[in-house]
Image: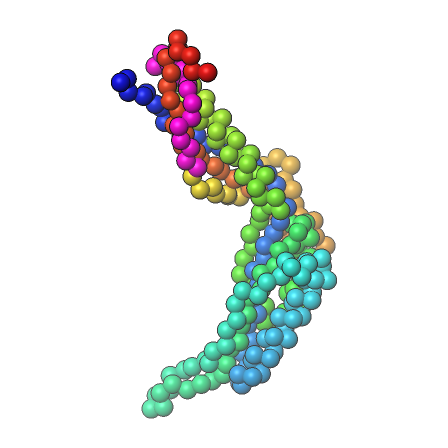
Amino acid sequence: MTPVRTITVTGEGTAEAVPDLLTLTLAVEVRRDAAEAAYGDAGAIASAVTEALRGHGVAGLDLRTSGLNLRAELVWAEHQGQKVTGYVASTTLVARVGRSSAAPAAISAAVAAGGDSLRINGIEQGFTDAPAVAARAQEAAWREAEAQAARFAALAGARLGQVLSIDQRPEHGSSVPMLAGMQRASASEGVAIEAGLVAVSASVVVQWELDSPGSDAD
């Protein structure tokens, strides 16, 4: 029995797009002498921050509390051991801002509502239709894999037959500055956010059967 000849190649593709979604992570932290006061004030400030974001177009379903903590603040005193000097209450809020251009004003409103108790823990830019961008990267990876396989098959005096296996590798994205036509998030207040480009990459490993030029593969 003639062994089946195969070829396995890896294709990589990238799709770039301007992000239209920004995920903002905020934290409220309050220190008070009593635990009840710290917890209550943290809740009140967090509610004010939430209302400020809603007032700038952030929908209720795009707001999520991801952390809540209440702890005693301790210091070490000689001959006394640990002493409680106060209590710290904190909570973390994750907000999805539908348009990156609306983010600076929304962030400024949140900072104004939270005051000195507010912390900005980071932002992440992405897409409202992430699968569509990922699909473009996957298609580019497939085209590269197919072109490589066909080229090597021709060099080996063969042609591509049927696909035997497909192994998709995890996708990843990275921000790429736009050197031409940089898009800036316009804001009447606060720090402007550069939208840039986000590049989503895909990788696929494909194995084809190799057919002889004269064989009837169809």
For the N terminus, the quadrant is top left
Q: Which residues are magenta?
A: 153-168
118 in magenta:
no
Q: Main secondary structure of the magenta part?
A: strand
Which residue is situated farthest in the left direction here?
1
122 relative position to 55: left or right: left
Q: Image height check: is 5 above or below 141?
A: above
Q: Is 159 contained in the magenta span?
A: yes
Give the farthest residue toward the front: 1
Q: Residue at x 42, y 39 (%)?
A: 169
Rendered residue at 41%/86% (across/down): 83
Answer with left or right where residue 83 lies relative to residue 104: left
Specify whether residue 154 is in view: no
Residue 163: percent from left, percent from top: 42, 26
The relative height of residue 177 versus residue 156 in the rendered view (above or below) is: below
Quarter of the rendering containing residue 149? top left
**Residue 99 position in % (x across, y down):** 67, 50
**Displayed quadrant of residue 75:** bottom left
- Which residue shows up at 63% across the image and 58% down it? 62
Query: What residue is at 34 percent from the left and 14 percent from the top?
Result: 156
Q: Quadrant of residue 25?
A: bottom right
Image height of 203 relative to 163, above or below: below
Q: Check the image and name the residue furthest to the top.
A: 214
Query: Residue 190 location in percent, x, y?
Result: 66, 57
**Image mark count:** 0
Please indicate whether residue 121 sits to the left or right of residue 77 in the image: right
Q: Is residue 29 above or below residue 165?
A: below
Percent across and percent down for residue 213 are 39, 10
